[in-house]
């Protein structure tokens, strides 16, 4: 009896947690399927499946361009962050040099500043570089919060790879680049998938920098574009469109997570080199 | 197959000197074992030869070529690591083939060589498996195969058996000995296990604190240790060491017990004798020391009798299966045959060369040519 009770308790807790986490998304989905004045009636079950909101967002503003912008920015951020952090991780975990620890903590410290605190200073930097209202400015600024994280994770991961592997590769006639390409990259793929995915999500969802550093709709990324969706008149907030857009931009993230989760889990549990 | 010569080799890490001037000449095709306690520098010495560590000063020659500053890939060496260091993301076949492939060997030739080596090590059926699907012994074989397939001039083994259990270790040891017979390669093997050193080596290099204590054939080190350190390191249980005073043809313990000895020595010395050389004497005959049995270990075919001498020093006696084994607390007498005694001075060096079976000139501490 007690076992059944405790199991039931656990199941209830899991359901409650899942409900708590998923409810906002669920509510966005059902809201996006409503139209007209239904939007302003609170209901928790889908009643209609009206796709007009989904169709409308493509027409009223250049939402496809916004999505493309987001993809460009997020992909660049992930690619640059991983490339820089793999090389940095190699230096920080394998090369002995003075101030290595201090450098690691400095990198960590950078990620402690709230975005708002660096916003105005960063704005000057972006403008000074001539990157205002330019996607490159967003890529640059996003790496402020993706790099510390990716560098740290990859450094710890690389530190756990036995040095002998590298030495075995050296004995096998491999140069430094070949070692990274043939030994480190395959072994670090799970860690890179995990950190890359998180960097992608962070870049994809970022709002404040995107709002501040862009001006025209042609340069806007999805979160800003969604926030700035306007209705027919300024007294109408087009909830249907906003929710439809939100659902559309969430789907790629869910697909990515599902795609990589097996790989990440498989890689991380695959076990040690020595076993 | 290549000769390996080390000349006045020194390696310093920051301020610590790990290798302190080593001269060594390893003949082509020889199986040399570096042995010593942990921290003696044996692994560092191997890594210097491999080129994984930069030499501080001195020269390394492989063949007749100076490779002191050559990258590892140019030295013609292959290494088997203690942790095997197999690439976890490649199956056994790819692990073995990888070095060849990177060197640009043609695929047919790679395949042929990998299969031949795999047959040699009896891992032909395991080639599709990844390292984590292999047992410790199988991983070891793959690691050895990876080294063999490159047909190096010199094989380097860094404690290859220390991750295996005892039974597997004995078996793999035999196999490495067989490999040495089949392959025309110089082999350098690092271990901390004196038994491995004794059974595998053509020649043992015993290291201590970055210096060579003695170089020689296993039996030489066993029968004629150059220093007290060698005497105590080689052999299990180790050689007994008893501090004595040499006076008027007698060796005297601190409590006054003594035995007659006709050796040209005087003053303080350490007397050494192997457990199997000590004989039990039941009467107080000439040249016998009184002792009390402190502990007996019965191994079945023999017993180790731990005896306590009059001055309190311990002495282990190997007692064969014949005759009654003394029991704990028994009073016994120990006969120490004069021709089995070793003497060491206060600096730990051997004092007399006589007791060893006559084999000619004294082996020099380093670089002595092998007598065979």
Image (cartoon, coloured by chain):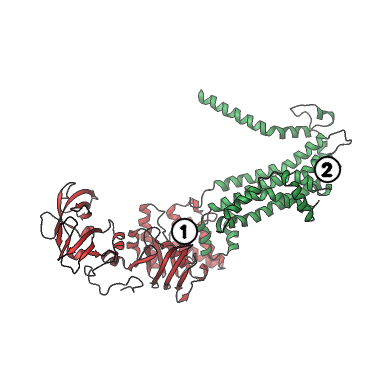
Chain colours: A green, B red
Left or right relative to A135: residue B176: left
Image quadrant assignment for residue A130: bottom right
Image quadrant assignment for residue B210: bottom left
Asked if badges 1 and 2 are on one and the same chain, I answer no
Res. B163 mark? none
Task: Give above or below for B361 relative to A253.
Answer: below
Image quadrant assignment for residue A186: bottom right
Residue indicated by mark 1: B142
Left or right relative to A271: residue B286: left
Residue indicated by mark 2: A58
Task: Give above or below for A23 relative to B283.
Answer: above
**Where residue B172 appears, x then y in whole percent?**
38, 58
What residue do we see at 61% from left, 31% from top? Answer: A14
Is residue A195 visible in the rendered image? The answer is no
**Where residue B11 appears, x then y in whole percent?**
45, 66
**Quadrant placement of the C terminus of chain B:** bottom left
Q: Nearer the viewer, residue B235 or B322?
A: B235
**Quadrant placement of the N terminus of chain B:** bottom left
Chain on which label 2 sits: A
Q: Nearer the viewer, residue A62 or B335?
A: B335
Comparing labels 1 and 2, the label whose residue is closer to the camera: 2
The residue tagged with tag 1: helix, strand or loop?
helix
Query: Between marks 1 and 2, how big is the CA–CA gap?
Result: 59 Å
Q: Could you classify mark 2 by the number of other residues whose Cα lies within 10 Å: few (under 14), some (14-19), or many (20 or more)?
A: some
Task: Give above or below for B23 relative to A132.
Answer: below
Residue closest to the far top = A1
**Where residue B369 appears, x then y in whole percent?**
34, 74
Q: Nearer the viewer, residue A83 or B69?
A: B69
Chain on which label 1 sits: B
């Amino acid at each position: 009896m007690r076992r059944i009770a405790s199991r039931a308790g656990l199941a209830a807790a899991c359901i409650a947690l899942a409900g708590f986490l998923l409810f906002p998304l669920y509510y966005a989905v059902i809201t996006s399927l409503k139209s007209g004045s239904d939007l302003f009636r609170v209901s928790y079950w889908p009643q209609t499946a009206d796709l007009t909101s989904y169709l409308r967002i493509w027409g009223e503003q250049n939402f496809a361009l916004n999505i493309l912008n987001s993809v460009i920015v997020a992909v660049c951020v992930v690619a640059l962050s991983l490339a820089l952090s793999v090389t940095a991780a190699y230096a920080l975990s394998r090369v002995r040099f003075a101030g290595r620890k201090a450098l690691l903590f400095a990198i960590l410290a950078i990620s402690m500043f709230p975005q708002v605190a660096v916003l105005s200073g960063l704005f000057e930097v972006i403008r000074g570089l001539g990157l205002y209202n330019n996607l490159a400015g967003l890529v640059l600024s996003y790496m402020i919060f993706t790099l510390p994280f990716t560098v740290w994770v990859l450094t710890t991961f690389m530190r756990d790879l036995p040095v002998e592997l590298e030495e075995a590769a050296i004995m096998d006639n491999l140069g430094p680049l070949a070692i990274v390409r043939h030994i480190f990259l395959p072994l670090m793929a799970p860690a890179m998938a995990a950190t890359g995915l998180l960097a992608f999500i962070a870049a994809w969802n970022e709002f404040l920098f995107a709002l501040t550093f862009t001006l025209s709709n042609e340069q806007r990324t999805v979160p800003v574009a969604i926030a700035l969706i306007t209705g027919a008149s300024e007294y109408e907030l087009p909830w249907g469109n906003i929710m439809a857009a939100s659902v559309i931009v969430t789907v790629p993230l869910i697909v990515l997570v599902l795609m990589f989760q097996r790989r990440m889990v498989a890689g991380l549990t695959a076990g040690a080199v020595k076993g | 197959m290549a000769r390996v010569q080390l000349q006045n080799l020194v390696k310093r890490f920051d301020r610590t000197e790990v290798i302190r001037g080593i001269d060594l000449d390893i003949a082509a095709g020889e199986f040399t074992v570096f042995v010593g306690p942990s921290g003696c520098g044996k692994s560092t010495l191997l890594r210097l030869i491999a080129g994984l560590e930069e030499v501080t000063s001195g020269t390394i020659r492989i063949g007749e070529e100076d490779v002191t500053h050559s990258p590892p890939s140019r030295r013609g060496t292959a290494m088997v690591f203690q942790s095997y260091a197999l690439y976890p993301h490649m199956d056994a076949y790819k692990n073995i083939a990888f070095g060849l492939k990177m060197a640009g060997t043609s695929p047919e030739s790679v395949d042929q060589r990998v299969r031949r080596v795999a047959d040699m090590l009896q891992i032909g059926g395991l080639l599709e498996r990844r390292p984590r699907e292999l047992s410790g012994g199988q991983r070891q074989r793959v690691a050895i195969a990876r080294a063999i397939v490159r047909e190096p001039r010199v094989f380097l083994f860094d404690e290859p058996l220390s991750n295996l259990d005892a039974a597997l270790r004995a078996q793999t040891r035999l196999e490495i000995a067989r490999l040495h017979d089949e392959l025309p390669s110089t082999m350098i093997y690092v271990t901390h296990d004196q038994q491995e050193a004794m059974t595998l080596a053509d020649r043992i290099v015993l290291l201590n604190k970055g210096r060579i204590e003695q170089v020689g054939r296993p039996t030489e080190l066993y029968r004629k240790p150059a220093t007290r350190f060698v005497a105590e390191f080689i052999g299990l249980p180790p050689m007994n060491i008893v501090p004595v005073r040499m006076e008027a043809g007698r060796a005297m313990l601190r409590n006054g017990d003594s035995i007659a000895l006709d050796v040209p020595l005087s003053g303080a010395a350490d007397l050494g004798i192997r457990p199997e050389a000590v004989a039990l004497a039941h009467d107080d005959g000439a040249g016998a020391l009184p002792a009390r049995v402190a502990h007996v270990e019965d191994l079945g075919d023999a017993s180790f009798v731990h005896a306590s001498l009059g001055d309190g020093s311990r002495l282990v006696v190997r007692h064969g299966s014949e005759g009654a084994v003394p029991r704990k607390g028994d009073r016994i007498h120990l006969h120490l045959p004069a021709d089995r005694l070793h003497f060491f001075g206060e600096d730990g060096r051997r004092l007399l060369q006589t007791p060893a079976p006559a084999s000619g000139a004294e082996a020099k501490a380093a670089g002595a040519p092998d007598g065979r």
